[in-house]
Image: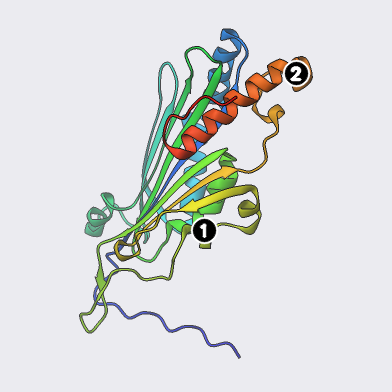
Amino acid sequence: MTLKPSKLKLYGFNNLTKTLSFNMYDICYAVSPEAQRQYIEYIDEQYNAEKLTNILQQVSSIIGAHILNIASQDYDPQGASVTILISEEQMEPSDADVVCHLDKSHLTVHTYPESHPQKGIMTFRADIEVSTCGRISPLNALNYLLDNFESDIVTLDYHVRGFTRDVSGKKLFIDHRINSIQNYISRDTKTQYDMIDVNVYQENIFHTKMILKDFDLDNYLFNINVDDLTKRQQHHIRRLVRQEMLEIFNGRNMPTMR
């Protein structure tokens, strides 16, 4: 018989704040100014405020949170934002405890489509933050979000802040085991990406960067196929896209690839 682990007995309620942040990047090459305009329109449609709201509502359901408020906005000329305030427990409008959740438990997403001014490189970035207090954990939504955006590069940050107390008064600065965000990433996703960690264990700060292993040029072309290009054009575009990916992954400009 398997014994269930006993629940941690706390004094009051769990004051720990757990925040999981994503920077997700999708890279594309558009061959002409018209194609670049169409790409921006395509991204704006694929990730408009309504669709992003649906994604965050699903995240709320996955982590077991209750939605208090939703604010969303599409921007001109491009981009969108959604913010959802959440609580661990179901709240009535008159419940005074709502106040203690508003600034600590939230879901946000902001999108940033943009393009290189000369080279035809298009970059779409989505910034997502899942911040919770109490027992619910943003890590439960990690794989859902990774699967939904299917990004070329992902930067992940996880930080546990504050402390709670057990019934004897002892401070608890974290309430679960973790030595890497990779502990919570699915095996299938791990096989698709190269990953590196930068962790500060004594501060409960965890950082993971991911970049796709496989590089199929067809996946990075907008409204054209590889067969539409000469070998020289293929080599040129492959070099531009790969350099963009490596610079984003490494967080710095790099010497031009040959």
Q: Which residue is mark 1?
A: 182
Q: CA distance from mark 1 to mark 2?
A: 38 Å
Residue 46 visible in the picture: no
Q: Earlier in the sequence, mark 1 or mark 2?
A: 1
Quarter holding the C terminus is top right
Quarter holding the N terminus is bottom right
Q: Which residue is mark 2?
A: 231
Q: At 49% from the left edge and 52% from the top edge, which residue is drawn?
A: 196
Farthest residue, direction right = 227
- Disc 1 crowd, CA 10 A, few/some/many (<14, 14-19, 20+): some
Give the SS element for disc 2: helix
Question: Hey, what amino acid is under mark 1?
Answer: Gln
Q: Count the marks.
A: 2
Q: Is residue 201 above or below residue 236?
A: below
Give the SS element for disc 1: helix
Query: Of tags 1 and 2, which is closer to the observer?
Result: 2
